[in-house]
Image (cartoon, rainbow, N blue to C red):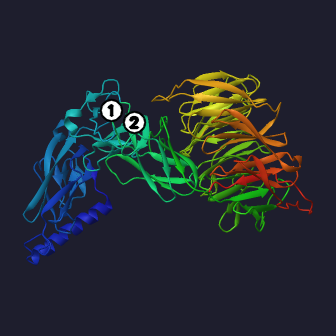
Amino acid sequence: MRQFSAAQSVAALISILLLAVFAGCGGGSSTNNTNPVTSIVMTPSSVSMNVGQVSKITGVTKNYAGNTITADVSYSSSNPSQITVSPTGYICAGIWDANYINCNALAGQTGVAQATITATSGDVSATAPVFAHLQVDQITVNPPTGCVSVGATPSYTATAYNTTAPGCSVAIPCDITPSVGPISFYSTDFTVMSPNTTTGVLTANEPGSTNIYASIAGLNSVPQAALVCPVVSINVHDASSSNTTFSLAPTNTQNLVADVIDSAGNSIRPALTWSSVPAGVASVSLGTDTTTNSAVVTANTAGTTTITATCASPTCNRNISPEYSQNLVTVNVSGTTTTTVYAASTKSLMLVPIQSSDNSVQTAITLPYLPNSIASDSNGTKLFLGSDNGIMAVDVSTGQVSVSSAALGKIIATSPDGAYLLVSDSTFGNVYLYATSSTTSALTQSLTSFGGAFTPDSHSVAFLAPSQQLFYYTTLPTSSSTTLAFVPTALDVSAQGGLTYVTGSALGAIDIVPTCNLSSWQTLAANAPTLIAHLPNGTGAVVADSPSVDVVTTGSIPAGCPPTPQSSVTSYDLGFGSFTANQMFVSTDSSRVYILSNLSSVIGLNLSSLTPFSISLVNGAVPTTGGAMIDNSRVYVGASDGNVHALTVSSGSDSAQISPNLKDPSGAAVIPDLVYVLPK
């Protein structure tokens, strides 16, 4: 006998009393005459119950417009000798007592039955089947093989077993599947695959991995792995042609489309992440064409930016390896730009803005702690400084400084969208994945790192540990690692995100590792490679390899994970003798690579003519840190003479020496060893 709960008993009695009152008042119609019922939807659409179990069914009344309305509903069973229903829709897999409080089960197989429950409101009715069966003790899901594509409604089956009835046991369970009726299936990740709450039918929503389980009479099966076919190919181009390079004036737009193929060979429209780096030059947003994977690029200011599309967790290829676009789009925005250059020192509490329009020094911003690093997002809207006391965030429009102690140490990588910083703390031996909006650490690893780089979609970051390990974080967040064949020196991620380049100076190697699974793919021979930087145009990377620069040329990137493109390396002697590279950066148009070293010049390689160049600093000063403007017209570097030097690229000259007048807390002059050019 199944006893009804106190709350259910009260509800049932109230319903009976109300029905009696309505009947006594002569209310012959059970519908609202001013808004009549035109349909009833049964929820759930079918019911599966163990013998003696109680379950609720609801007839949802709707009007002509399909809107839910309030109306009286009565319920009846087609088989009241085995399955009964209360006036309020509570079903008993057996016989209700007179007050609808106790559900009395029928013994053994006599309780196994089917019935149709009818909900009636006025002259409108709807039905739902009910299945009463022996108790379900075990459920086994029988998943289909392979994967299903986005939009599919895969057919799953399950087997229900009883192990407690006479003749049934755990060793020899009885298959009672034919008596349980339709089985509902559910997913553990609704982003990947979600169920229809009425029918229990699953729909594939996004590429990725999930687990599927069956539910019968309140019992769930052990989840089984299921896969919505992953994206294996993304190609980005003009919406109306195959063009991948564009020239735009500020405020102009360009429509793009991504051709996306899944592992079953189907063209699909998943939730791609579109990215532009640097976003200060041009931004990218989802397009309005709902028939394609569309996007719109809007030009902001002079410079060059690259556009990529990615299928990666948490929105696409969820819980599995990411897929990066096999190509990228290059957008050149015409004109000139002005920006802000920030000068700071690891020995000063001053942060000094310099306007590039006239190289004028602005009012200094007071920092609460001594900085050890400086960075920004690729849009140039957020400036961050690392310190031993926390992360200092500077509002570039107001100069206001806020501090978070959730991550201590040096910023070694910044996501292009500015949402995450990778921070390494050598004092306490931790690496933090710091979320800038919530000012919290999303992941913490007990080690220190000396190099890291985010993928262009800002969803993942790779970084190095001294113990020959390459780590990989995703913003889901999760972490993984692999052991390299050599002690690493530096790394960077390719412009499209699919490859990670790692140098090993002791071994004289440049390793190429697919970002999606960190499997070693190709090792190139070099001399003593140190710093490495990807080429923004997606053709490879450049490596500081004194007295040379190595140019890594990567061929076309094939589909799938891991991608296995062929790369080659060519070394170009710069002709300036030995140098120790301290910083290296590439112009956004991929035309030049700049190296700041122990030499009193900024040296580099013209990547268009493959010829070396140098720009000598006035006063024989040695550069510290710096960067190039996004329109590639000037390079700003701090130097040993205490000045910030503005270098004109076209003439190869040190055209201005700007004194930020940095002081330490005791008032002594210090050199600008943290100089940053805002990418806007």
How far is the residue under mark 2 from the one under mark 1? 8 Å
Q: Position of residue 470 (x, y in %)?
A: 65, 32
User: Which amino acid, mark 2?
Assistant: Pro
Find disc 1 in the rendering and name its residue.
141
Residue 238: give x, y in percent of width and height: 41, 44
The foreground one among 482 and 51 is 482
Residue under the image location 45 percent in, 55 percent down: 253
The x and y percentages for residue 165 are 27, 33
Mark 1 Cα within 10 Å, few/some/many (few <14, many 20+)?
many
Residue 475 in which image quadrant: top right
Q: Quadrant of the C terminus?
A: bottom right
Helix or strand or loop: what does disc 1 sit on? strand
Q: Which mark is residue 223?
A: 2
- Asked whether residue 145 is in view, the answer is yes
Residue in front for this viewpoint, 184 or 548? 548
The earlier-in-sequence mark between 2 and 1 is 1
Q: Are marks 2 and 1 in contact (CB under 8 Å)?
A: yes
Residue 267 point in image, percent of width and height: 33, 37
Q: Nearer the viewer, residue 197 or 499?
A: 499
Q: Residue at x 71, y 28 (%)?
A: 572
Task: Please tell me which residue lies in front, 53 or 391.
Answer: 391
Q: Residues within 10 Å of mark 2 (few under 14, many from 20)?
A: some
Is 97 displayed left or right of 485 in the figure?
A: left
Above or below: residue 96 compared with residue 22: above
